[in-house]
Image (cartoon, helix red, strand yellow):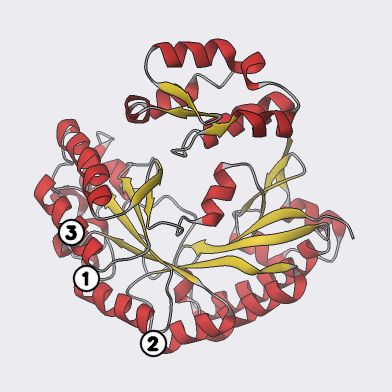
Amino acid sequence: MMNKKNLEIYVHIPFCARKCAYCDFLSFPGNQQMQREYTEKLIEEIKCQSAKVKEYQVISVFIGGGTPSILGIEDMTAILRSLKEEFEILTDAEITMEVNPGTVTAESLSGYREAGINRISMGLQSADDKELRYLGRIHTYDEFLKSYQRVRMAGFDNVNVDLISAIPGQTLESWKNTLKKVTMLKPEHISAYSLIVEQGTPYYGRYKEDVKMENNSLKPEEGYCLKSLPDLPDEDTEREMYYLTREFLAEQGYERYEISNYSKKGCECRHNIGYWTGVEYLGLGLGASSYLNGCRFHNTPVFNEYCSARLDQEEAFQKALRQEFEQLTIEEKMEEYMFLGLRLMKGVSAHEFVSNFGHNIRNVYGMVLDAMEEDGLMEYKDGNYRLTSRGIDISNYVMSRFLA
């Protein structure tokens, strides 16, 4: 019997109730007709793509967005059923779904679990209602608590909570309060990111550009306009939040296994680890990215183009679903392996580097590794090259040294 290669699947659901002020993901509100049309095309793509990856077995599925939980339970069940019918998904595969606390019910959660979801990722961001309003979130902390309880009552025993620090007006004390409240709930996993003001978002107009704020105001029903937002925490406060996160979560029994991710023992996100260690992945849905057979490509990000594509015709399939097709060189593959792998606390394996690329890691990156070790930014331990505590603090700089 042929040994099948491992594959991860990402499914993109672009719809959301309302786009948050800081969000630069491919997402937008969509009515029921748009959602149904999208679901039908997504299932068509699942059938079309599965025929091209028969030599793979699926080890994880991640359904992200947007807000996947905004879809009706019938549509989500149909998507999951199609995935199981068309792909060889391992019985112990991790199947994650992102949910917004403002969009889940006991009934929908029960349906997700019955359909095969075994891991829930909840986007809380902050336990402070004022900070949630500043972010443009559609839920309060109390609504999150009720949704979290529903998740547990539905039988989910693997739950992630997403948090964001350095929110406008946030203090060290309010961030610590968020960490305390969340850890008291004992989720298996916590993702804690520092806010990045991305170009193209409303936040960019408020904090990065010298423009008239009246042209960048949110709608009145969103509770505030951008020009009324408080300033971002200063760099020193943001750095204190970063150190507090690491120390406080460690005290509460959460192991930091990646720069921004913490988990109880054995509850690391397998899908993300696969991404950071070079496992191939197939992206399904609007704008979704893929990496297969050393090639990187992505689907069209234009809704009408995606939904009108004739996927049964090869030329139309290639045009709609394989945009910016890029064949990576061996050098680019090695760079990516280092850049992503160094995000993990265990670092990159010298042995796996040889297995993957046929080159000794020191023959390729010896000078950089020596320089980073000499500066106290990296260390070699148990066969792995990894960042030191100081190296983690300036990880972007260290990782950039491995790029041509």
**Three-letter amino acid code at disc 3?**
Lys
Give whichever of discs 3 and 2 has the lower sequence position: 2
Q: Name the residue under label 3.
A: 180
Q: Where is residue 2 in the image (x, y as percent from the top left)?
A: 88, 57
Which secondary structure, mark 1?
loop
**Three-letter amino acid code at disc 2?**
Ala
Q: Mark 1 points at which residue?
A: 140
**Three-letter amino acid code at disc 1?**
Thr
Q: Distance from label 3 to label 2 (Cα)?
A: 26 Å
Residue name at image x 56 percent, y 22 percent: 403
Residue 355 horizontal side relative to residue 99, left or right: right
Residue name at image x 38 percent, y 87 percent: 106
Residue 189, located in which quarter of the rendered image?
Answer: bottom left
- Of residue 86 and residue 137, the one placed in the foreground of this image is 86
Residue 175 horizontal side relative to residue 53, left or right: left
The label number, if any, that marks residue 106 in the structure image: 2
Residue 147, located in which quarter of the rendered image?
Answer: bottom left
